[in-house]
Amino acid sequence: MTDEAPVPATDAKPTARDPFVWFAGGRGGAIAVAVSVVALGLSAAPYFNGGDFGGKVRAYLLANPQVMTEVQAAFESRAESARVDTINAAVAANAALMAPDPRDPAFGPADAKVTVVEFFDYRCPGCKAVSEDYLALIRANPDVRFVFKEWPILDRGDDTTSNYAARAALAAHRQGKYLAVHQALMATSGLTREAVDAVLAANGVAMDQAAAVIRDTGTDRLLADTHTIGATLGLVGTPTFLINGKTTASINPQEVAAAIAAAKAG
């Protein structure tokens, strides 16, 4: 059951983006990996015959810098694989946490064979980058249940804009206007409370009713419960996608689409 009419289909097809896989080290991580490789070679030098082993390692790496890229890629792959395994194991061990929650905005058949859950924050760059492609996935899979977990994690100190945006979206959900508001918030850069209110008003949300939901203790409980779920499952960032309880290694919409197709086939 949905809280509003489905978004009309368009001729636009989901577009492919470059894979979005987050690596905490970035360029610094690549340098660290390279230094580790050199250090490993130097530390092993005393155990090998043949002269200047450390110098040979250094010369080889300078002549073949692609090796450092390959090492970094292998490191990232193992880290991502470990993260995926850890989250999937946590989901399996805490199945009750992923039971359908009628408080969450959801679209598609309640008895769907495949359920996709997204944890997100309206100020998350990755969430914004994939939001249009994700909406296209919803349109392309009317037989799949899509659940939206409002997970505002990017607030710091007195800045509570992410939390306010999540509450505003849930208020729009109460009035059957969730998807339109969700997409508008994702499309808005530099979110402020004023910008959030402008999005609500522009999409026909009754502001007095919305204000009551934003302040409601029930909204407090829902967001607190989502934070508990995220912590229990060991989620490390947004967006995180779960397809029938299995997370994806990246946020690339193509990978999410492939996981949906695999779940349907299974």
Image (cartoon, rainbow, N blue to C red):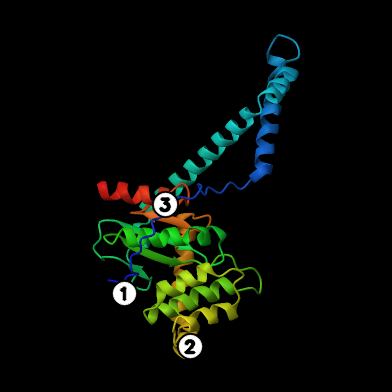
Q: CA distance from mark 1 to mark 3?
A: 34 Å
Residue that carries the numbered disc 1 in the rendered image: 5
Q: Position of residue 126 (x, y in %)?
A: 53, 57
Mark found first going from the N terminus, 2 or 1: 1
Q: Position of residue 179 (x, y in %)?
A: 41, 71
Q: Which residue shows up at 58% across the image and 31% down it?
A: 70
Residue 222's mark? Answer: none
Residue that carries the numbered disc 2 in the rendered image: 207
Q: Position of residue 249 (x, y in %)?
A: 46, 46
Q: Nearer the viewer, residue 233 or 240?
A: 240
Please rate how many residues cluster around mark 3, counting C-alpha atoms within 10 Å: few if below 14, some from 14 to 19, many from 20.
some
Residue that carries the numbered disc 3 in the rendered image: 90
Q: Amino acid at mark 3?
A: Ala
Tell whether label 3 touches label 2 (CB within 8 Å): no
Q: Which residue shows up at 65% across the image and 35% down it?
A: 33
Please rate how many residues cluster around mark 1, counting C-alpha atoms within 10 Å: few if below 14, some from 14 to 19, many from 20.
few
The secondary structure type at the circle numbered 2 is helix
The secondary structure type at the circle numbered 1 is loop
Please rate how many residues cluster around mark 2, counting C-alpha atoms within 10 Å: few if below 14, some from 14 to 19, many from 20.
some
Q: Amino acid at mark 1?
A: Ala
Tell whether label 1 touches label 2 (CB within 8 Å): no
Q: Position of residue 231 (x, y in %)?
A: 49, 59
Q: Quadrant of residue 219?
A: bottom left
